[in-house]
Amino acid sequence: MAQGGSAIRGSRVGAGPMGEMDHGVHAARVSISYWDALGNETVRHYSAEIAEDDIPELIDCPISGLPAGRDRDNPPAATKVAPYKTHLAYVKERRTNEEAERLLDEALSKLRERRGKTTTKS
């Protein structure tokens, strides 16, 4: 069985040894460490030319999902997450039960009129 292709599996033509530095110029960068409330450290790299004000003070930790700050001894506290509300929950916050009944009756009566079935509720 004849095999064709590269003599070294997984390599491509023109690929040099791993770690070869003449494949381009690396931009200068700064490394900033962030810590969450559980003590997890996350390192983010930013351009050395970026203004200090443009580097965020808080990020979301990819390990825990908690907010992470730059102060190791005083990490930000976890924020309380409000549960997801459905559309119906928001509507119920704005309307009383009496208003809801009245609106439902109006909508049903309009629907019945369009369909030609006018009936009154007793």
Image (cartoon, grey):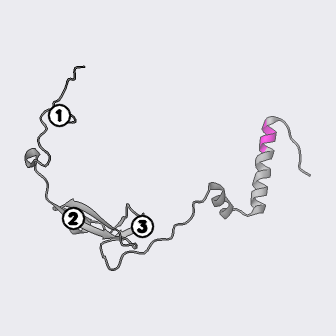
For the point 78% across and 56% down, which residue is it? 102
Q: Are marks 1 and 3 in contact (CB under 8 Å)?
A: no
Q: Amino acid at mark 2?
A: Ser
Query: At numbered mark 3, what does the secondary structure look like: helix, strand or loop?
Result: loop
In this view, the residue farthest toward the front is 1
Image position, residue 114 (x, y; %): 78, 37
The image quarter containing residue 45 is bottom left
Alpha-carbon span between mark 2 and mark 1: 36 Å
Looking at the rendering, the stretch of residues picked out in magenta corresponds to 110-114
Q: Amino acid at mark 3?
A: Leu
Q: Nearer the viewer, mark 1 or mark 3?
A: 1
Mark found first going from the N terminus, 2 or 3? 2
Q: Amino acid at mark 1?
A: Ile
Residue 113 falls within the magenta-colored stretch: yes
Alpha-carbon span between mark 2 and mark 3: 20 Å
Image position, residue 32 (x, y; %): 24, 67
Alpha-carbon span between mark 1 and mark 3: 44 Å
User: Does 8 sit above or below residue 50?
Assistant: above
For the point 77% across and 41% down, which residue is it? 111
Q: Nearer the viewer, mark 2 or mark 1?
A: 1
- Residue corresponding to mark 2: 31
> 103 left or right of 32?
right
Main secondary structure along the magenta-highlighted residues: helix
- Residue corresponding to mark 3: 66
Mark found first going from the N terminus, 1 or 3? 1
Image position, residue 97 (x, y; %): 76, 62
- Residue corresponding to mark 1: 8
User: Does 37 sit above or below residue 112?
Assistant: below
Query: At numbered mark 2, what does the secondary structure look like: helix, strand or loop?
Result: strand
Image position, residue 121 (x, y; %): 89, 50
Residue 72 falls within the magenta-colored stretch: no
